[in-house]
Image (tube, rainbow, N blue to C red):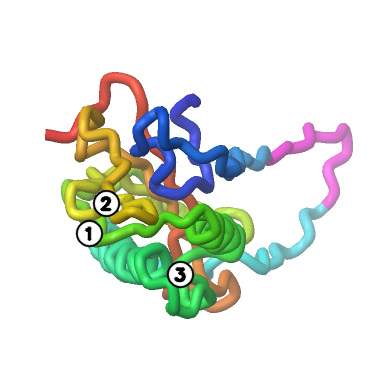
Amino acid sequence: MDNSLGRSTPAYGDRMRPSSRVPWPKFLVLAVASTLVVSGCSATPEPAPPPTASPTALTAPFFDSHEDALAAATQAYAAYSEQAAALFSTPGSNPELIRTVASEEFADALIAEALQIRADGLQIAGQNSFDGVTLQSVDETTAAGSGVVVVQLCLDVSGSDIINTSGVSIVDKTLPARSPYVVSFDWQDPANPGTLLVGSQSPLLGAARCE
């Protein structure tokens, strides 16, 4: 896997010992970059039409500064972490609640994985934590309100465990507990910016490390 953003879960399956792995579906959607093509000048230029506002463009920035964007993203990821923990560790929880903190496509992938985990007789105990959040980019006018804010953070899975029907942990303890991730946030409502949802997260491979 490369370092592109993928709409993937925290890779619970990748934490399992090889003998305990279950062939769960992988969810990966590559980020699509839009390209603006500008036409050349004609021999007889005509008056330019009056500018029209894009349906997804903001007339004024919502965030006053990059610090505000980082704070909003950090708060949104904290809310996501709590709902994700409930989704994966509480069998009786309402899976639809994850849609309040994650984009539709990402929420669909999370719910599918949670249901598969339960079907396999496994249980997630505890909750992941995170720190070291750093801002990578802010683009409030991005197409369809996706990828508005992108951050890098360290995901710590030491506070969670994967347990089988015998109550035995099947986590591969040789794997690092802390890993760097890139997380992208979308506007909950592009027509009314203000609330961020987790749109995707992907492990940052290569030389990147969490201290």
SS assignment at label 3: loop
* Image quadrant assignment for residue 144: bottom right
Q: Residue furthest front?
A: 166
Q: Which mark is residue 60?
A: 3
* Image quadrant assignment for residue 84: bottom left
x then y, percent, for residue 71:
24, 64
Nearest to the eye among marks 3 and 1: give it: 1
- For mark 2, what is the residue? 161
Kind of residue at badge 2: Asp
Which label's residue is closer to the chain start, 2 or 3? Answer: 3
x then y, percent, for residue 128:
25, 55
CA separation, marks 2 and 1? 34 Å
Q: Are marks 2 and 1 in contact (CB under 8 Å)?
A: no
Q: Nearer the viewer, residue 91 or 145?
A: 91
Quarter of the C terminus within the rendering: top left
SS assignment at label 2: strand
Kind of residue at badge 3: Ala
Evaluate whether residue 175 shows in this view. yes
Q: Which contiguous range is marked in magenta?
A: 36-46
Evaluate whether residue 140 shows in this view. no
Kind of residue at badge 1: Glu
Nearest to the eye among marks 2 and 1: give it: 2
Judge the density around disc 2: few (<14), some (14-19), many (≥20) Cα neighbours within 10 Å.
many
Query: Which SS does the magenta portion mostly show?
Result: loop
CA separation, marks 3 and 1? 17 Å
* Image quadrant assignment for residue 190: bottom right
